[in-house]
Image (cartoon, rainbow, N blue to C red):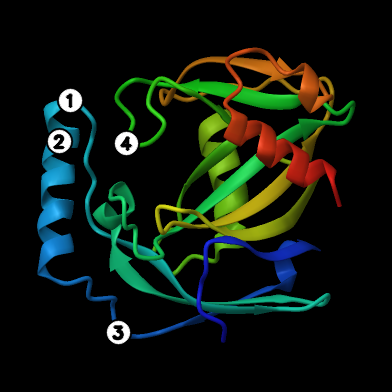
Amino acid sequence: MKQARTGLLARGPWRPDQVEVRWRDEPYEPGDELQRAADDAVTGLRERGSPAHDGMATRLAGWSANGECLRLELQPVRWALRLLDDASGSMTALCVVRAEDGRWLAGRRAGWVSTWAGRWALGAGGAVDLGESPAETLARELGEEWRLEPQRLTVEALVYLSNGMAMLIGLATVSDGCKPVPDEEHEDWAWWPADVENWPAEADERLKLMGRLLVDR
């Protein structure tokens, strides 16, 4: 399987059942320096009132893709590595949400959360639990963060971010009349216009890049 590199690794769409997962038994060993940095990062979270649930999560160890399926090779990894500038391939899933009329669901993250605190983000996302398929994480996070069930759900892309985080991007379509119920990780929420170029000023340029990626198939 291919090793990760920064940028777009694979482009779908795939159905969730077209994502195949194989697990390595051995956990990833990051080395003493990264372990100490992870300890410090968890301490920093606790000091600002964030529930630092350090434990084991998932790392992308390899991948391959074609038009029929996306194959992921995963392994256990310490959760706190995702907080570092070198996330070592820690796996996250982002479920972008659009209404049938094209609007995008966005939420402003609470100040105590571990990532993107106080900033606007698209849809729902989070770490891939140990033993979980990242395709399953998409629907789980959508239900936990917004109490929504998608009418359609596709796996759109696998990307590797500049901080060493691997991200599976999904796109959920919900009904125009649905009523999102945000969890405690969100301080505010809104529907942004269908046209990415008409998004409000609080839309980070990285969010616009994400929106353009999903529009440009």
For marks 4 and 2, the one nearer the N-term is 2
- What's the residue type where badge 2 is placed? Gly
Q: Could you say whether the residue bearing mark 2 is in a helix, strand or loop?
A: helix
Classify mark 4: residues with Cα within 10 Å, few (<14), some (14-19) or many (20+). many
Q: Could you say whether the residue bearing mark 4 is in a helix, strand or loop?
A: loop
Is 9 placed above or below 188 here? below
Task: Read off the residue under disc 1.
Answer: 48
Q: Position of residue 175 (x, y in %)?
A: 83, 29
Is the residue under label 2 in contact with that under label 1 (CB below 8 Å)? Answer: yes
Q: CA distance from mark 4 to mark 3?
A: 26 Å
Q: Could you say whether the residue bearing mark 1 is in a helix, strand or loop?
A: loop
Question: Going by the image, does 130 lie left or right of 173?
Answer: left
- What's the residue type where badge 1 is placed? Arg
Question: Going by the image, does 139 lie left or right of 42?
Answer: right
Classify mark 1: residues with Cα within 10 Å, few (<14), some (14-19) or many (20+). few
Q: What residue appears at the point 52 percent right and 69 percent down from the top-left corner?
A: 5
Q: Could you say whether the residue bearing mark 3 is in a helix, strand or loop?
A: loop
> Residue 2, which numbered label?
none
Of residues 71 and 131, which is closer to you in this image? 71
Q: What residue appears at the point 32 percent right and 36 percent down from the top-left corner?
A: 114
Question: Going by the image, does 56 lie left or right of 123?
Answer: left
Task: Read off the residue under disc 3.
Answer: 26
Can residue 147 be seen at all in this image of the molecule?
no
Of residues 18 and 61, which is closer to you in this image? 61
Is the residue under label 1 in contact with that under label 3 (CB below 8 Å)? Answer: no
- What's the residue type where badge 3 is placed? Glu
Q: Nearer the viewer, mark 3 or mark 2?
A: 2
Task: Read off the residue under disc 2.
Answer: 44
